[in-house]
Image (cartoon, coloured by chain):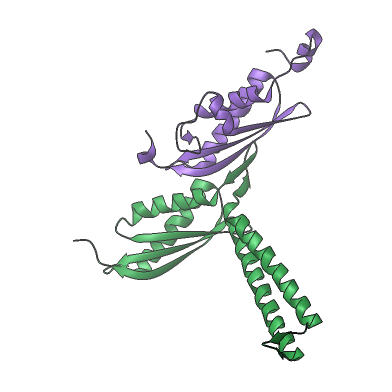
Amino acid sequence: MARPEEMEEAGRISIAKDVVSTIAALAAAEIPGVFAPSGEPFPRGPAARRHVETELLGGRVRVSLRIAVEYGRAVPEVVQELQEKIKAEVERMTALPVEAVDVEVTRVVFSEEQS
Amino acid sequence: MNLLLGIEALVLFLAAVLAGLGAWLAPEVTIRTNPVPELAVRVTLSILAAAFLGGSGACLALWRQRQGLSSPLKQPGPRGLVFITPHTVVQLAVGLLAQELPETTFRVHLQPQKEGFSLRVFLRLPQEASITEVAERVQELLTAELSRRTGLKVQEVQVVVHGTARAPR
């Protein structure tokens, strides 16, 4: 994986915020127990961007996302796994350093709600 | 809903200011050609101003309380901030209580605190239930499980038993 400075030698690379949001959403969809705030499975396509916001400040990324957590799971454990997964995936795919991944848990999803 | 409360507080405050100004200026008032004494006008408008001001204060207090209830509880996580909405915590508490006390009807209110939150649980217990035993079980369960499942500090769990219910036949 090329580092940012190596990329600059060959030319400028711009990464849209939506790309980072999509990567974060895909990572979120892979974490067990994480759902969209509506209670449905976390969407993988562009629809996921409704729940993910990305800020790019001085070449650093800050991702904020809203999720629901499956009932029975410990929120801190799920959130920690999610934060680490998103940070790792965004850094691996974009080479941009992730400053923080802020997570808002808006609700709990009970088993009978899951389709 | 919160916005409406804020607007109500503002309107009532403006009405209080107007009534206060009226009390201070004491305009001439006549009812069916009989002039009302200045003192009566001042007293009436002062009472109105105080009532409007009280109403405005009550709306403002309610508005602030609701703002607090709708804003998420915040704690630092390993890679960023973690926000948990009060609704999420209440859902967790309801899930736990439904498992622990399947024959009991209950309501859960959450009050955010400077650090963590406190809960008030309203229970309608079956007639044969021991109130102290159930209350202790509820307090222990919610304190332990909610702090484990949310990472937030459970400051207090108040149990209010507001009635008994017959077990279904």
Q: Is residue A101 visible?
A: yes
Residue furthest toward the front?
B33
Q: Position of residue B9 (x, y in %)?
A: 66, 65
Chain in purple in the render? A
Q: Residue at x 43, y 68 (%)?
A: B160
Judge whether A44 appears above or below B152 on screen: above
Which corner quadrant of the image does residue A85 belong to?
top right
Image position, residue B73 (x, y; %): 59, 50
x and y percentages locating residue B150 in the rendered image: 52, 47
Q: Where is residue B123 drawn, in percent x and y?
A: 38, 64
Asked if A86 appears above or below B122 in the picture, the reply is above
Q: Quadrant of the C terminus of chain A?
A: top left
Which one is in front, A112 or B82?
Answer: A112
- Find residue B19 and report its image quarter: bottom right
Q: Residue at x 34, y 51 (%)?
A: B99
What tint does the image give chain B?
green
Q: Residue at x 62, y 47 (%)?
A: B75
Q: Quadrant of the N terminus of chain A?
A: top right
* Residue A27 in sight: no
In the image shown, does B82 or B62 lie closer to the viewer? B62
